[in-house]
């Protein structure tokens, strides 16, 4: 089960399942997002892992653009990596086309990139849930 791109006899990619399990158990937090007609509410618990960590540096909410934020749980480093990817994709789209990237397009683009992470042995699936 060490090979990331090889299926098990049951048709599973163990490395992807390990990433999902890590994302679900690493943070141990409950996060909820509720969408309304023209608004949304994001709520999450805040857990500071150590007394030596600055509480203001611990977050699960990331600003992507002036009008878009994302709530993520999972491995903190993977969440930050994914937030950076979201910002990059949104800014590249705005630079290229002159208007803000639609949320559905951004979600599809980043989902497609995450899918590639499961297909290449040189990459690993991120343990982050958006």
Image (tube, rainbow, N blue to C red):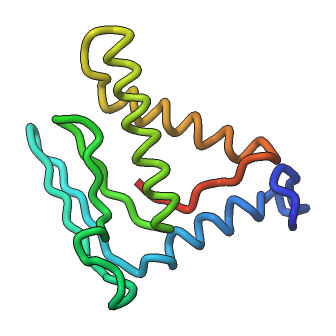
Residue drawn where x is 35% and y is 25% of the image: 91
In which quarter of the view is residue 12 placed? bottom right
Report the residue that reaches farthest toward the left: 38
Q: Can you name the residue that lies furthest to the right here?
A: 9
Q: Where is residue 26 in the image (x, y as percent from the top left)?
A: 50, 77
* Above or below for 23 versus 66: below
Considering the image in quadrants, where does the N terminus appear?
bottom right
- Residue 37, percent from left and from top: 10, 39
- Write the residue at 34% across / 14% down: 95
Q: Which residue is drawn at 31% across and 70% down?
A: 58
Q: Specify whether 112 is left or right of 40.
A: right
Depth check, front residue: 113 or 11? 113
Residue 13, given in percent of the width and then of the height, sits at 77, 58
Where is residue 70 drawn, in percent x and y? 30, 50
Q: How many numbered callouts?
A: 0
Q: Is residue 118 left or right of residue 33?
A: right
Q: Is residue 88 left or right of residue 30?
A: right
| Viewer-closest of 15 and 93 | 93
Residue 119 lies, with reference to residue 11, above or below; the image says: above
Question: Is 43 located above or below residue 30 in the figure?
Answer: above
Residue that appears at 63% across and 41% down = 115
The image quadrant that residue 52 belongs to is: bottom left
Quadrant in which residue 129 is drawn: bottom left
Q: In this view, does 42 lie to the left or right of 5?
A: left
User: Looking at the image, which is closer to me, 93 or 105?
Assistant: 93
Judged from this view, the residue extending furthest toward the bottom is: 51
């Amino acid at each position: 089960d060490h090979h990331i791109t090889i299926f098990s006899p049951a048709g599973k990619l163990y490395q992807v399942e390990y990433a999902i399990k890590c994302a679900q158990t690493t943070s141990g937090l409950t996060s909820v997002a509720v969408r309304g007609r023209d608004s949304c509410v994001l709520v999450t618990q805040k857990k500071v892992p150590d007394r030596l960590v600055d509480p203001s540096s611990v977050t699960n909410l990331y600003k992507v653009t002036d009008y878009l934020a994302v709530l993520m749980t999972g491995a903190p480093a993977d969440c930050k990596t994914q937030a950076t990817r979201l910002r990059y994709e949104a800014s590249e789209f705005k630079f290229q086309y002159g208007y803000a990237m639609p949320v559905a397009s951004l979600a599809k683009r980043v989902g497609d990139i995450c899918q590639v992470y499961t297909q290449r042995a040189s990459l690993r699936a991120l343990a982050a849930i958006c």
